[in-house]
Amino acid sequence: MAPRRQVRMTPEEAQRIRAQDAAGRLDHADPEVRRVIEDANRTSVRAHVYGRDAASRGGIRFSFLVTIGSALLFIAGLALHFLLPPL
């Protein structure tokens, strides 16, 4: 059996699949259909949580890196304060 190729669906495709599922037009007995429905649900949740496009995901990454950098700078300053002798 050949390995499955990972194909990412767009959030718009995922919404259409979820709408078809909510309307009862999809057969849940077929394992491939269930897999596509699960992928659509996963894609919709990711789009909702992380943003719909790469630019919004990049903004989240940037803010995460700034937060980590600020925390490291604060810890370094605190350590430096305690390591230096008092004046």
Image (spheres, grey):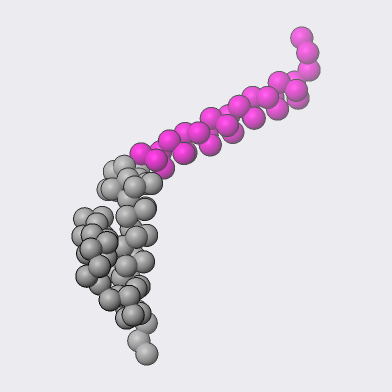
Residue drawn at the location 29% of the way across and 43% of the way down? 55
43 relative to 49, above or below:
below
Q: Main secondary structure of the magenta part?
A: helix
- Magenta run includes residue 2: no
Q: Is residue 72 magenta?
A: yes
- Magenta residues (range): 59-87
Q: Residue at x 28, y 48 (%)?
A: 52
Answer left or right for 78 relative to 15: right
Q: Locate residue 82: give its quadrant.
A: top right
Q: Nearer the viewer, residue 76 or 6?
A: 6
State whether residue 35 is above or below residue 16. below
- Return the residue nearer the eye: 56 or 28: 28
Q: State which quadrant residue 30 falls in.
A: bottom left
Among all residues in the image, which is located at the extreme top?
87
Return the x and y of residue 45 as percentages of the image width and height: 36, 53
Q: Quadrant of the N terminus?
A: bottom left
Residue 80 visible (yes or no): yes
Kindly tell me whether residue 17 is visible in this rendering. no
Q: Position of residue 44 (x, y in %)?
A: 32, 55
Which residue lies at the image location 76% right of the left edge and 25% below the top edge? 83
Q: Is residue 39 left or right of residue 79?
A: left
Foreground pick, 7 / 78 = 7
Residue depicted at 70% across the width and 27% down the height: 79
